[in-house]
Every structure is written in C-alpha cells, then in structure tokens.
Amino acid sequence: MSRGDGPAAARWRRLVTDRLAELERLSPAAGSVSGSFWDSRAGRYAAAVRRANTERDPFLRRLRRLTDASSTVIDVGAGTGRFALVLADEVDHVTAVEPSAAMLAILRRDAQELGAANVTALQATWDEARVEPADVAFSAFVLTLVPDAVSFLAKLDATARHHALLYLGAYSGDAVLDPLWRHFHGAPRAPGPSYLDAVAVLRELGIEHRIRIVEIPDHRRWATIDDAVESYRDALLLDDTAQVRAELAGLLASWLPGRRGAYRSPLRVMPAAIVEWRGGRLTGR
Ligand SMILES: C[S@@+](CC[C@H](N)C(=O)[O-])C[C@H]1O[C@@H](n2cnc3c(N)ncnc32)[C@H](O)[C@@H]1O
C-alpha cells in the first residue's frame, strides 16, 4: 500500500465527497467550496470573524508562541485574513493563500488599510499554490472542505520549515442543528469528517503530532429574528422563500436563547482542536 492509500484517507475522501455532493444537490447555485461558494459569503464572514475577537483566540496565541519578528508564515485558506493580518504586524512576512476572490479582496483591502506591506496574497487553492517554504505553515477551518487530505497535509508538511498546524472544530455543529435540519430536509445531514478523522490520516502518514483541545467563546448574537433567519437559512442550506423564512423564524424564536432584540447562539463555547507537528516529517528533513 502506498502512502495515502490507507483506510483513514479513503474514509476522509468519502465523507468530504458525500458532504459536498449533498451541498451541491441542495444549493446547486452555491458554487465550488474552493472558490465561488465563499464569494457570496465573504462580507458576512468578515463581519462574523470581526465579532469573534481574534486577539483572544487560542490558535492565535499558539501561533504567537511559535513565531517572532524574523519568522515567515503561510496561512492556507486565509479567508478574510483574521490570523494573517494580525500576525503580519509581528512577523517578517506572511503569505496568505486563498481561492475565493471576494475573501481575498477583503484581506487585501484590510492589509492596505493597516499598512501591512509584508503580506503576499495569492489567489489559489492549496493544491495550485506555488509557494516557498516558510517557518510556520498553518490552516484554520479548511481541511474538512478538501477531499484529498493526504496531498493537502503532505504539502503543508513540506512547506513548513519548523512548524505545521491545523485548526479544526472539535464539536459537532451538525448534532446541534440536527432537529432543525431534519425538520426541513426530512433526513439527517451527510456527516462531514471530524478532527479525529484528520488525526487518523496523520497517523496513517506516520506524522507524529500533538493535539490540544481549546474552547472558542461563541459570541454570535442577532439583533432581530430576521438576522438570525438569514444566518441559519444559510447554515441549513434552505431556499430563500417567504414560506421558509416564516417557518424558520417561528422555530428560531423559541429555540434560540434570549429574547427580542438579543438572540444568541445556543452554544457558550465551540471546542476546537489545534493539531501541530514539526515540519518536514514526510520529506525527512
Ligand atoms: C471557513 S473559511 C476559514 C477562513 C480562515 N482560515 C479563518 O479561519 O477565518 C474556509 C476558507 O477555506 C478556503 N478554501 C476552500 N478550499 C480551499 C483549498 N482547497 N485550498 C485553500 N483554501 C481553501 C475558502 O475559500 C474559505 O475562505
């Protein structure tokens, strides 16, 4: 069996492929998750991560411990740049790899506003990206969108001179949304891979790694039920019709904690996994 042909890699590929097929079936116009899918979400995503208070994020704290003013860094699937742009102020150089044009446009605009001249923004998937190795290579909340975990991880490993890191959810958002999902879709959602599936692929590759489970405070708030409907309609992949909106508004009004003027997420924290290893494990550096 060659590297990457193992059962964990095959399971990963199946879970992601089935999940993406379901997304495609329910939202045929949404576009590819390695590109245009995120284009229509970029503005909302930027607003959400601004509220999330990156300064207190455990992943940023870990990245800060591994870098200094002389470090070079690569952020794979950088989104609107919540980690890349904070680090730019503290390290020598940041390369932000991001396939969505709209996400990248926000990252570039914010980099310019901050005067961050040491950020290279590259529009590409990780598979396509041509980058030089960096001291630290990391990817936050991207891997579960990529069917070929082995290539993704092998490239991250080869690109990281010192440290490679992944940030992945460590709770089941699907389980939280399951009653709402089944109410509208009549069947459970196709399960995506979890951080444990990622860890199983790393084991299969023979990459020794360290895992730390951290908690991200969930600060999601909606001033009106209509704002909450917009957010959950997207998360539940529901059509934008008056009937869906009315039905969802009724359900959310009783399901979300809080009251008129201050609805909040049912979660207090969102557990996440920081998985890290010394780069160059596969190339034997
Ligand atoms: C949930 S967002 C995370 C963004 C950012 N890392 C953060 O934590 O705020 C996922 C991002 O992954 C990007 N993405 C999807 N497939 C990718 C791929 N194959 N290579 C690199 N980035 C990808 C999307 O365009 C999107 O911006």
Image (cartoon, helix red, strand yellow):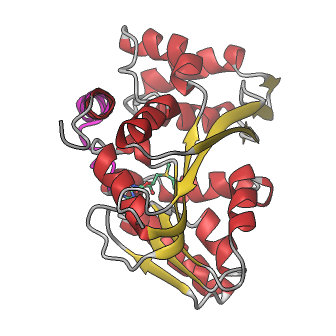
Look at 26% across and 41% down and name the residue there. Answer: 4
Dividing the picture into quadrants, the one containing residue 147 is top left
Q: Residue furthest left?
A: 1
Instruction: Please state the horizontal and vertical placement of residue 249, each as a whole percent of the image.
Output: 59, 22
> Image check: 35 left or right of 240?
left
Look at 25% across and 35% down and name the residue there. Answer: 24
- 199 or 116: nearer the eye? 199
Instruction: Please state the horizontal and vertical placement of residue 21, each as a whole percent of the image.
Output: 24, 31
> Image check: 227 left or right of 142?
right
Magenta region, main secondary structure: helix
Dividing the picture into quadrants, the one containing residue 156 is bottom left
> Image check: 273 left or right of 246?
right
> Image check: 8 left or right of 162?
left
The stretch in magenta equals 14-34
Classify the position of the C terminus by image quarter.
bottom left
Total labels drawn: 0
Classify the position of the N terminus by image quarter.
top left
- Magenta includes 93? no
- Above or below, 199 against 42 in this view is above
Q: Residue furthest front?
A: 284
- 63 or 142: nearer the eye? 63
The answer to whether one can see residue 52 in this image is no
Look at 50% across and 63% down and name the residue there. Answer: 78
Q: Dividing the image into four equal quarters, which quarter contains ligand 1?
A: bottom left
- Magenta includes 32? yes
Instruction: Please state the horizontal and vertical placement of residue 49, each as a whole percent of the image.
Output: 65, 54
The answer to whether one can see residue 42 in this image is yes
Instruction: Please state the horizontal and vertical placement of residue 239, each as a whole percent of the image.
Output: 37, 30
Look at 80% across and 55% down and name the residue there. Answer: 56
